[in-house]
Image: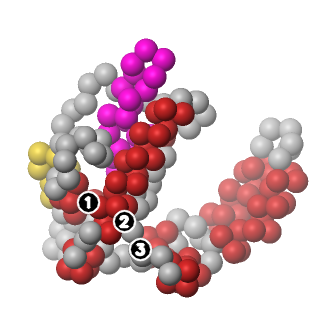
Amino acid sequence: MEVTVYDHLKKIPKGVIPVAEVWYARRFTESNPLKGYLIMEYLNNIKAVHIFENVPLKSMEQVLRAKAALEALSLRFTSEEKKQFTANFTEVFADFYTEEAVEDVVKYFRDFGDKKFQEKINKLEKALPNLLDFPAVERLADEIGMQRVLCHGDLWSMNLLWRPSGDDLNLAAMIDYQV
C-alpha cells in the first residue's frame, strides 16, 4: 500500500508534504508477495535525528503541517480511492502487539535502570488492555462521528528526514508510509 500512498502524494503541489521523488515502484501482489520495492531520489545533506534528541518547535510544526495535509488529502478521496486502503487497524497492528510482545516491553521498562519508573509502569500496565482493544479502536471513528483519514502509520524520528540549517532543522521528507 505504500506505493499507493506515493501515487496519491504525486497529485498534490510539490512542497505541501515533503517527500522524496519516487522514480520506480513495484507493488507487493498475490503473484509478487516478496519483491516489492521503491526506487527513490537520493536526498543529500540529511541529518538523522534520533528519538532521544530534541527537535525545535518550529521544525516539529513542519511535521504537523505535513501530517495534516496528508489527512486532509484523504478526505477528498473518492469511494474508489478509499477502497485502495483496505487493511483495517487490527490487520495492520495486531501482529505487532501480541500479548507476549507487550509483556516483554513492560518487563523491559520494569527492569530499566534503577527501576525509577515502577509507578508509571504500573499505571501503564493497567491501561494497556484498553489501549490494545483493537475492535474498540476500529469502531472509535464511527462512534464519535469522525471521518476516517489516511494516517502515516509509522511516524517516528527515523522516518523523518531532516536537513540542518544553522540551529534549525528543515523537514526534507517523510518516508515509510505504513497505512
Q: Are marks 3 and 2 in contact (CB under 8 Å)?
A: no
Q: What span is colored magenta in the figure?
A: 158-179
Question: Which residue is disc 3 drawn over?
Answer: 148
Which of the two marks, 1 or 2, is nearer to us in this view? 2
Tell me which colouring the rendered structure shows: secondary structure
Counting from the top left corner in percent of width and height, residue 172 is at: 32, 34
Decide: is 41 above or below 138. Answer: above
Q: Do the residues labelled 1 and 2 touch (CB within 8 Å)?
A: yes
Pick out the residue farthest to the top: 166
Mark 1–mark 3 Cα distance, whole angstroms, equals 15 Å
Decide: is 83 above or below 101. Answer: below
Number of other residues with Cα within 10 Å of mark 3, as a class: few under 14, some 14 to 19, many 20 or more: few
Question: Which residue is disc 2 drawn over?
Answer: 150
Callout 3 amino acid:
Arg
Reading the chain from its start, which is encountered first: label 1 or label 2? 1
Question: Which residue is disc 1 drawn over?
Answer: 5
Q: Residue at left 39%, top 68%?
A: 149
Mark 3–mark 2 Cα distance, whole angstroms, equals 7 Å
